Image: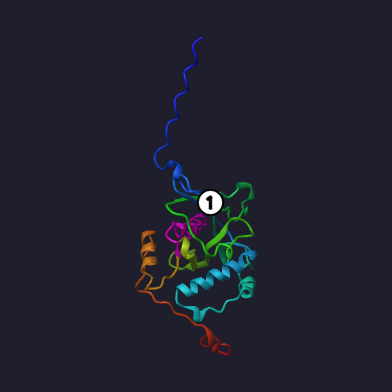
Amino acid sequence: MAAAAPPPPPTPAPEGFNDVPRGSTPMGYPLFSRIRLAHPTDVPHIHKLIQQMAVFERLTDLFVATESSLSSTLFTSPPFQSFTILVLEVSETPFVEHLQCNNSAYPPTIKTHNLDLPIDDAERDLFRSNGGDAVVAGFVLFFPNYSTFLGKPGFYIEDLFVRECYRRKGLGKMLLSAVAKQAVKMGYGRVEWVVLDWNVNAIKFYEEMGAKILQEWRICRLTGDALNAYVNA
């Protein structure tokens, strides 16, 4: 009997295929994100994020909040009825469905992002979430307000912040969209916030999200000694 013909040589892989760096895929570098309700154990991370936001906004002279003051004031009411914080977490590995932070008031929102380059997070250990692989990358804090013209409640966003190494990845859009989606779900009439006039990148981003910049309005504020002067009014 004649010997069987040798098997054909293996088809060579496409050029560069075997050179895909570890941690990447042919689609890029996956980053998994999750938005969930904050809980009191998140306060140390939230406090650090607010501190970084004060530096970015050049307002460190106004930053006096402490972890204690945040803990005692932020978690006194059910979500969406008063102060509410959504935390943004990211991970290089998928969030396991059965280990998600389940909360009937707000089921976590999960998304996968395919990035061209990996993210170098020098503060990964500082912002590690509950000792796992995920890290806290940002947050949004908001609470109800009311429009007498619409005859409806709305949400006012006090703070929305994403750490610098995670910006321009669509994560800020996720946070803002989460608040807007919740407002629609609850039948609210609008979502409002303010932006510093020099932050042209943020202004452009908000306009691209469909927000209208109200140039004719100004913020009025009573605080510190000016507020305390009314104690005996």
Which residue is painted at 41% across and 70% down in the image? Answer: 195
Q: Position of residue 81 (x, y in %)?
A: 58, 64
Prevalent SS, magenta region: helix
Left of 21 or right of it: where is 233? right
Left of 40 or right of it: where is 229? left
Q: Nearer the viewer, residue 169 or 69?
A: 169
Magenta span: 167-191
Residue 31 visible in rendering = yes
Give yes or no for residue 227 being in the magenta stretch: no
Q: Secondary structure at mark 1?
A: strand
Residue 162 visible in rendering = no
Q: Nearer the viewer, residue 229 or 39?
A: 39
Q: Nearer the viewer, residue 136 or 183?
A: 136
196, above or below 18, in the image: below
Which residue is painted at 63% across and 66% down in the image? Answer: 77
Which residue is painted at 55% across and 88% down in the image? Answer: 230
Q: Position of residue 175 (x, y in %)?
A: 49, 59
Which residue is painted at 53% across and 51% down in the image? Answer: 110
**Label 1 is placed on what type of residue?**
Ile
